[in-house]
Image (spheres, rainbow, N blue to C red):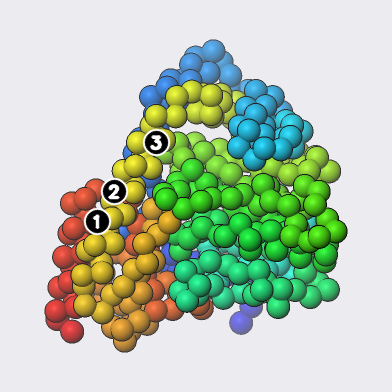
Amino acid sequence: MTNSRISPMAETYPASDIRKMFNLALDFPDAVKLTVGEPDFTTPEHIKAAGIRAIEHDNTRYVANAGIPELRAAIARKYSTRWNRSIEPANVMVSFGAMEALTFALDVTVSPGDEVIIPDPSFPNYLGQVHRLGGVAVSVPVTEDNDFKLRAEDVRSAITDKTAAIIINSPSNPLGSVMDRADLEQIAALADEHGFAVISDEVYDEMVFEAEYTSIAEVKPSTAEVRAEFDRFLAIGSFSKTYAMTGWRCGFVIGTEDLIAPMALLQEGLTSSLPGFVQEAAVAAIEGPQTAVEEMVASYARRRELMVERINAIEGLSLLRPAATFYAWVNVSEWGLSSWELATHLLEEHNLATIPGSAFGPAGEGYLRLTFAVSDETINTACDRLEAFAAAR
């Protein structure tokens, strides 16, 4: 029975099994947790110092809706160099984390009834954001047979005359995969041909190991007739993962000026502006030394090897070496339980908290997502408990 006091959108908003598992784990305070997608490092000292300094200098008032000029300019300079294309401050919108950036990107491209193509498995909040706008999510399966990479040919088969956008996520949470440049070029060509936007979630763009990483902003459509720069993209970034700044809530979106400009008006009606002292810290993050980032990525790469070695030694489990992020997408299908059943058993019987693959979409069934942004000791203890579960079967 529906509650007439609640809007249909709110009442039918898709619940996240990630949050459901997180809440279950609260009853097991001593559980070993491989659940949270968050760096286990603290924010580098020079970034914290910049934020503190800004507060001491009374940068605690409203600032420009789209972000302070210094931060927009710093982001533009970084990505102009990285993408080898001209990015101006007017192409940048600063947001409350990547989630608000995604909100803005969908707000300016999707109308009620429009379709948005989404990889399956993928970050579950994509579905909620599309639902909030009255859009229709169209899932495209991403499989282990293709090294967990979204393929352009599968995207092509999902396009209709109602397609307004596609959300891509490379590097991928939860899959740890990096899309091939050829597929990105083909998707760009499809976007030009059919007139839809490519919303690219790139929050893990610095957390890449040996793979070759390409942003959608770097490609040219793979057609003989069109070789101009691709401009139907909205690239979403964040300081959270790269600089261990999850609690600072600083994200951004980059795109053409006609798409970015309305976002400042939307921000005015939502949260006004991200605090100026947070943005000054973000400027220090971009313009300061990157040594801490390099050290964090090297640490994740080393712990990835430990996770791969331990998981693949357990009977019934298999893991493709993730090319990026700090997630292991573990195939548990041989154990014969649904991913939710398995995650529940592991929590209740072995005090081990994991995320079921089905939380990321139907194609995630048969997998668990484990984070290796934890200590070596935690990885080893968790794998010991997985071994114990395997031995008791």
Image coordinates for residue 122, horizontal then vertical, percent:
53, 65
Q: Which disc number belongs to residue 306?
A: 1
Looking at the picture, tell me which residue is in the foreground, 214 or 310.
Answer: 214
Q: Residues within 10 Å of mark 3 (few under 14, many from 20)?
A: few
Q: Residue at x 35, y 36 (%)?
A: 295
Residue extending furthest toward the top: 57
- Mark 2 falls on what kind of element? helix
- Circles 2 and 1, Cβ within 8 Å, touching? The answer is yes
Q: Which disc number belongs to residue 294?
A: 3
Above or below: residue 251 compared with residue 71? below
- Circles 2 and 3, Cβ within 8 Å, touching? The answer is no
Q: Amino acid at mark 3?
A: Glu
275 relative to 52 in the view: left or right: right
Query: Who comes first in sequence, dot 3 or dot 1?
Result: 3
Above or below: residue 185 compared with residue 247? below
Q: Amino acid at mark 2?
A: Arg
Q: Which disc number belongs to residue 183?
A: none
Is there any visible trace of residue 62 in the rendered image? no
Please give the residue where the numbered disc 2 appears in the rendered image.
302
